[in-house]
Structure formats: structure tokens, C-alpha cells
Image: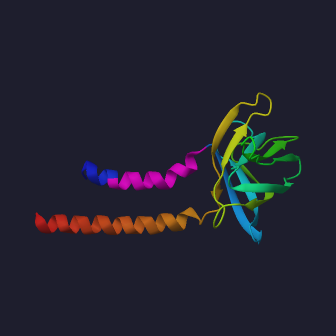
Amino acid sequence: MNNKKIRWIVFPLWLLIAPQLWATTVTYDAMNIAGNTWQYTYNVTNDTLGQDIGEFTIFFDVNLYQNLTSAIAPVDWDPLVIQPDPVLPDDGFYDALALVAGLPSGNSLTGFSVVFDFLGAGTPGDQTFSVIDPITFATLDSGFTQATAVPVPAAFWLFGSGLLGLLGAGTRRFREHH
């Protein structure tokens, strides 16, 4: 197999695997409550951070969000909501602090929730987040939240079968011409 074919196989596989390589994954389920009022429920996964997640912050763009309310968190976590401030201007945020023990590596926790008004068009989307060391306040990880996705195996098999079809067609054409 030549290098061009290898690149056509490796690059798409990398795109499927790369999102799973982050140390922290924050997914959300969106629910429209009424009009432009939405509720996001978050699931936080400590994939490979190497230490417990003791605090994280999800940011709400000052131009797209307002009226952050109903901050909910699992037992032993303390949620805090700060409103976006258009005068400064400064983004708002939802912050959750572990009161007893953080989220260990390889574990997930759901039940983090916030209600907000969305000022943009359509459905609200991904947001930025940071994982913070609650003692030193150093940022340990950051990224973008992701909508709860369709299970990867179905997408992987669909992509894989299409790739095999393309490789088979290319091999047949190569044999016919040589």
C-alpha cells in the first residue's frame, strides 16, 4: 500500500479517535423550556486528567446568554452562577466545586444543570469550559462542551464500510489498468 492510501485511511480514523483523547469531556443535553429559555444538563468525565477534578467552570458568552438561574449540582458539589455583564463586557459562568472529593480519573458524573435565556438564533450550542485546581486556581484542562452524541460505534461502522467500499473500488480499478 502506498503512502497516499495510508494517509486516506489514517487521517479519517484520527478524526474519529481524536475527540476521545482529551483529559476532560463535558457533554450536555439541551431542553427548550419555553421560547428562548433553555436548560442544559451536563455530564463531566475525567478521562485521563491524572488527578481528581475538584472544580470546573462553563462559560456563557455575554452576547448570547442572559438570566442564568437554577444552578443544580450533584450532592457534595457546590454550584455558583455569575451573570454575563454587558457593561464590562464579561462572560457569565456556571462553576461547580467539589465539597468532599473530586471526580477521579476514569469516572463520570452527571446532574450539573443551569437554566438560561439564549439571545442567538436557533438552538444554543457548545460552550468553553475550564477545569481548575481549587487550591492553586491553576487551569488544568480546557475545551468545548459537546452535545450528547450518537454512539460512536454506529458512526464508526458506517464510516468503515464506506472506506472499505472506496478501497475496494480503487483496487479493482488499479488491477484493470495494470
Asked whether residue 11 is drawn in magenta, I would say: yes
Can residue 15 be seen in the rendering of this structure?
yes
Q: Quadrant of residue 13?
A: bottom left
The residues colored magenta run: 8-22
Q: Is residue 117 left or right of residue 72?
A: left
Q: Is residue 132 left or right of residue 1?
A: right
Q: Where residue 155 sits: x, y (%)? A: 51, 66
- From the viewer's side, name the closer residue of 167 and 124: 124
Q: Residue furthest front?
A: 87
Residue at 47% from the left image edge and 67% from the top image edge? 157
Q: Where residue 151 sits: x, y (%)? A: 59, 65
Asked whether residue 79 is drawn in magenta, I would say: no
Residue at 80% from the left image edge and 41% from the top image edge? 102
User: Which quadrant, please, contains the C terminus?
Assistant: bottom left
- From the viewer's side, name the closer residue of 153 and 71: 71
- From the viewer's side, name the closer residue of 170 and 127: 127
- From the viewer's side, name the closer residue of 102 and 84: 84
Q: How is the image coloured?
A: rainbow
Q: Where residue 106 sits: x, y (%)? A: 69, 46
Q: Quadrant of residue 138?
A: top right
The secondary structure that most of the magenta stretch takes on is: helix
Q: Residue furthest top?
A: 136
Q: Is residue 110 above or below residue 48?
A: below
Residue at 77% from the left image edge and 46% from the top image edge? 85
Q: Residue furthest left?
A: 178
Q: Is residue 154 above or below residue 140?
A: below
Can residue 112 be seen in the rendering of this structure?
no
* Total marks in image: 0
